[in-house]
Amino acid sequence: MSAIRVKLVRGLAACAAKQRLVVRGLGLKKVDSTKLLPDTPQTLGMIGKVSHLVTWERVDEAPPIGRLARKKAAAEAKAGRQPPTV
């Protein structure tokens, strides 16, 4: 699976509040900020809503691991450890 690199190229000063929320949802904060996102229909839909504010490209990098997957991996690692003996 590929990933998408998104870059904010225009400011948010004259944008509607809904578009600002979409940009924040993509993880972009300031002009020229870049984010690597998974290539999903949801991500492409968000990019479509603010296409006049961002540029994007598909890259051959591993997509980022989501927050829930990181939490699950951490819980499994913690369950596999033995508590220290005193």
Image (cartoon, rainbow, N blue to C red):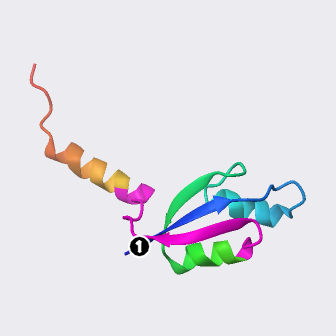
Vertical comparison of 85 with 26: above or below: above
Give the residue drawn at x 51%, y 64%: 37
Magenta segment, which residues? 49-69
Q: Amino acid at mark 1?
A: Ser
- Asked whether residue 53 is drawn in magenta, I would say yes
Give the residue drawn at x 59%, y 55%: 34
* Location of residue 23 in the rendering, given as x and y in whole percent from the top left corner: 70, 61
Element at badge 1?
Answer: loop
Give the residue drawn at x 38%, y 65%: 61
Nearest the eye: 23 or 4: 4
* Location of residue 3 in the rendering, given as x and y in whole percent from the top left corner: 45, 69
Residue tagged by mark 1?
2
Quadrant in which the C terminus is drawn: top left
The residue most toward the right is: 14
38 displayed left or right of 32: left
14 displayed left or right of 67: right
Nearest the eye: 58 or 49: 58
The quarter of the displayed image where residue 15 is located = bottom right
The quarter of the displayed image where residue 22 is located = bottom right
Specify few, some or many for label 1: CA neighbours under 10 Å numbering under 14, 14-19, or 20 or more: some
Vertical comparison of 71 with 22: above or below: above
- The number of callouts visible is 1
Give the residue drawn at x 63%, y 60%: 7
* Location of residue 10 in the rendering, given as x and y in whole percent from the top left corner: 78, 59
